[in-house]
Amino acid sequence: MRVLTVFGTRPEAVKLAPVAAALAAAPGITSILCATGQHRAMLDQVMAIFGLVPRHDLAVMRHDQGLSDVTAAVIAGVAAVIAKERPHWVIVQGDTTTTLAAALAAFHAGVPVAHVEAGLRTGDVGAPFPEEMQRRLVTRLATLHFPPTAAAAANLRAEGVAEAAMRVTGNTVIDALHALRARLDSDPALARALDARFAPLATGRRLVLATAHRREGLRGGLRRTCAALRLAAGRGDVEIVLPVHPNPAVRATVRDMLAGVPHVHLLEPLDPLAFLHLLRRAHLVVTDSGGVVEEAAALGRPVLITRETTERREAVAAGGARLVGTATGAILAAIETLLEDGAAWAAMVRAPNPFGDGRAAARIVARLRAGAAAPAVADLSLATRPARRRRTAGAPARAVRATSRQGA
């Protein structure tokens, strides 16, 4: 079985690294990695930490290109890789532009798609934008779905996905987190190096770790979040660390609001080991990132989600996260509660982790090896002839082809 795994952003690489490792170790599977380069510097950080060596690197990023430009470049690039490698499966993860474009390229080529972290929904196609719509579209293109939680599986069922086409696995970010934590715990020299790197934070003040990157935040929410962080820093009893996302609009806003503010540390994007080191030290986390919510839940770090809605409702229901919105006063009040109310903080620390046990990648590979039901794309009735089938042991039947040559 030949399996092509496509990723382009930092979160995809983190969450697919355990899957790539499990595929590489599985007998009878040829694992092929393709990086699109949608996030260049941050993607390279993750690939170096996890030892990911893509056979194909599309390097699609160009200065000042839009979402449609990225989408078109990834479709064309992945289509060429599929034609060269002739995989039996294409694996994509989450909700990025790379995810949607790679899934569409696979669909055009008649190759079934396996979707890792399927089924998450906010119910609002504008939040997050464009990720919510992209994730929904990938569901329509995918043959096999790997929802991380029972709630995500319920979302897929409600949209008509057959039970036989899904497997609840837990989230692969927990697998990655376990691997990184084991590496930190087993390497005292690495731990000392990270302590030295962040020595200015060893002040006795509590650490607040913040991240912000959502496009919808540029409509005002990001400025209000930064205003709340600035006011919190003014208390004088915390150190606030914010790794600044490379998006130029995000960087401009964050630096305008927080550069030079006492007790606020604006950092360049951190590699996963450095971020985990700070996450373990954090008293609380303020973020609009779904992946950070999952990581914090696994480590028992209280999270304040600075969005109006979230697709990680499980963390809120479990008690480890609070959805606080983007109003400055609400964010500041929530931060101060967790700094001043020990009982409220401890209750969030004790909340269970709803995102899995760290064995998601093994479940995904086992399901792929077991084969899949007939490809769901065949039900779309867009093709005129069936795909040729390989006689490879364990390989699933291919989806019917629907290519531009056939008028699709």
Image: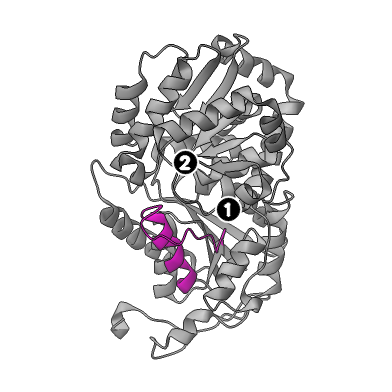
Q: What is the C-alpha distance between the residues marked 1 and 2?
A: 13 Å
Graded by Cα atoms within 10 Å as few (under 14), some (14 to 19) or many (20 or more), the crowding at tag 1 reads some
Above or below for 90 versus 228: below
The answer to whether residue 330 is above or below residue 100 is: above
Amino acid type indicated by mark 1: Arg
Seen as rendered, the residue at the extreme left is 64
Residue drawn at (62%, 62%), measured in percent from left and top?
A: 151
Q: Is residue 364 left or right of residue 99?
A: right
Residue 346 higher or lower than 203, as above or below:
below
Quadrant in which the N terminus is drawn:
bottom right
- Label 2 element class: loop
Amino acid on which the number 2 mark rests in the picture: Asp
Q: Name the residue located 40 percent from the left edge and 46 percent from the top edge.
A: 37
In this orientation, which residue lies closer to the viewer: 181 or 36? 181
Q: Earlier in the sequence, mark 1 or mark 2?
A: 2
Look at the image and say whether residue 267 sits in the magenta stretch. no
Where in the figure is residue 192, as x and y percent of width and height? 67, 15
| Residue designated by label 2 | 288
* Image location of residue 296, percent across then percent down: 62, 38
Boundaries of the magenta span: 116-141
Label 1 element class: helix
What residue lies at 64% left-to-right and 51% top-to-bottom? 317
